[in-house]
Amino acid sequence: MPNMIAIWMPNFIMSYLGSTVTPGEAGSQFWALIYVLIIFAGVSVAVMSMNWLERKALAHFQIRLGPMRVGPHGLLQPIADALKLMLKEDIIPSEADQFVFWVAPLIGLLAAFTVYTVIPFGPSQAVSDMNIGILFMLGVSSLGVLGVVVAGWASNSHYPLIGALRSSAQMVSYEVAMGLAVVSAILMTSLNEKGTGTLSMIGIVRAQEQQGIWFIFKFFPLGLIAFIVFAIAMIAETNRAPFDMAEAESELTAGYHTEYSGLRWSLFMLAEYAAMIAVSSIAVTLWLGGWMRPFVRLLHGPSWDFIFSLFPGLTFLGLAAIAFVGVLRMPAHSFFKIQKIGLEAFGGLLGFIALMLLVIAIAGRSQDPSIGSRLNESIGYIYWFLLKVAVFMYLFIWYRATWPRYRFDQLMRVGWKVLLPISLAVLIVTAIVGVLVA
């Protein structure tokens, strides 16, 4: 059967199968395109899911229900929102610079999605592994603010312009501290036999694997402090509460996108959420072991590997159980009949996915390098990576529900007088400790 498949499949498809490197390294343009399409589709679905989860989580924080009418438990609300935004009238102010006004949302969107080309979801689950991956990531992610600035200026309106200026000042303030925190992580990769560091995103995860410790715990508490600095800076970089100065609806109506409506406004939201997932992925890669599962050195061996391989299936099984519990808790009224059927179908889908993942985990238990075993490993890598990213995404929601918005002078003070000195001190001490340990 494999020989028959190889005969019918073109060489540019078969040549990459079984490879242990990324499509970019293997020179496979076809598989690089497939990876790009999968990432684009996955991130878009994740943004829709995040939109629903944020509305529901904030509602529960405030002791209310959130979306409930569109689909079971409001699960179809993101689709309804997308349709509404696509059908709304697209207005361009008469005094605006029309071409710049039109292109501004695309700048932020392209910057957010381009970062994903160097984010490794596994040892070979990335579009490409650049030897300057960190520099590429920092450079491209910084371009996102250009879309905000251009949108504020092109609107030819006071509130958007103020929001754009705030965003540019915010980016300058927090980009420096973020960069220094990243350099601290890069220094930790040089503690190997050769004494050389790496700027490769995959190489950084490999360094944590070889050293047997996540960098958040390296030279404790230096790694933890660098991680906290980066975590605070990335909230400011994505214009999220409590650092959402560029929007500030209580002061600037809606900030830089006040004059935008319909589909163009939705592109700003898509770019914002995509950037949130991207910076969370970067934090996971640099400090939390990337695709590595917890306790790799402490709990190792075939038995522990098998137990941890069951986690993806058990997670979906738990989500299916939550869906069915929701069905049981619905009132026994004819009005909820369609809601119950929809939630039962959703729970059944989650249960089917759980069953498939459990079957793959059991089939991949053998040590033989079969397709099932490699598939099981890949699922494990992606699962642990996405689970860590999901924790960050929930924290974004938690911050928004907990802290009030900073004043602009407080925002600048934190960036220049707190984070910058701390990140610089951590960098210097990390370098000193690294030299002494080496």
Image (cartoon, rainbow, N blue to C red):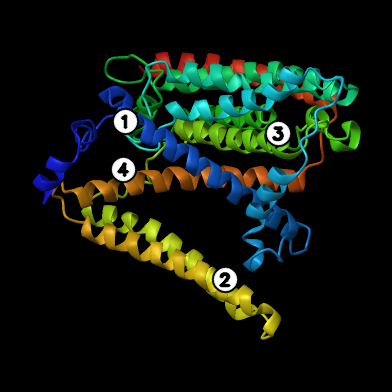
Are the residues at dot 4 and dot 3 in contact (C-beta closer than 8 Å)? Answer: no
Q: Are marks 2 and 1 in contact (CB under 8 Å)?
A: no
Which residue does the numbered mark 2 point to in the structure image? 342
Of pointers 3 and 1, the one earlier in the residue sequence = 1
Residue at mark 3 to residue at mark 2: CA–CA distance:
31 Å
Q: What's the amino acid at mark 4? A: Arg
Tag 2: amino acid: Gly
Q: Amino acid at mark 3?
A: Arg
Q: Earlier in the sequence, mark 2 or mark 1?
A: 1
The residue at which mark 3 appears reads as 264
Q: Quadrant of the C terminus?
A: top left
The percent position of residue 303, horizontal first and vertical second, equals: 24, 57
- Disc sitting over residue 297 in the figure: 4
Say if mark 4 contacts mark 1, CB within 8 Å: no
Q: Secondary structure at mark 3?
A: helix
Find residue 370 and report its horizontal and vertical position in percent.
Answer: 16, 48
Q: CA distance from mark 4 to mark 3?
A: 48 Å
- Is 346 rendered above or below residue 208? below
Of the image marks 4 and 3, the number of the one nearer the N terminus: 3
Nearest the viewer among 437 and 160 is 160
Q: Residue at x 45, y 65 (%)?
A: 349
Residue drawn where x is 83% and y is 25% of the image:
160
Category of crowding for the residue at label 1, using alpha-carbon neighbours closer than 10 angstroms: few (below 14), some (14–19), many (at least 20): some
User: For the residue marked with disc 1, what is the amino acid?
Assistant: Phe
The image's mark for residue 30 is 1
Which label's residue is closer to the chain start, 4 or 1? Answer: 1
Q: Kindly tell me whether residue 218 is visible in this rendering.
A: no
Mark 1: secondary structure: helix
Distance of label 4 from label 1 (alpha carbons): 37 Å
Q: Please state which of residues 402 and 90 is positioned toward the viewer in this rendering.
A: 90
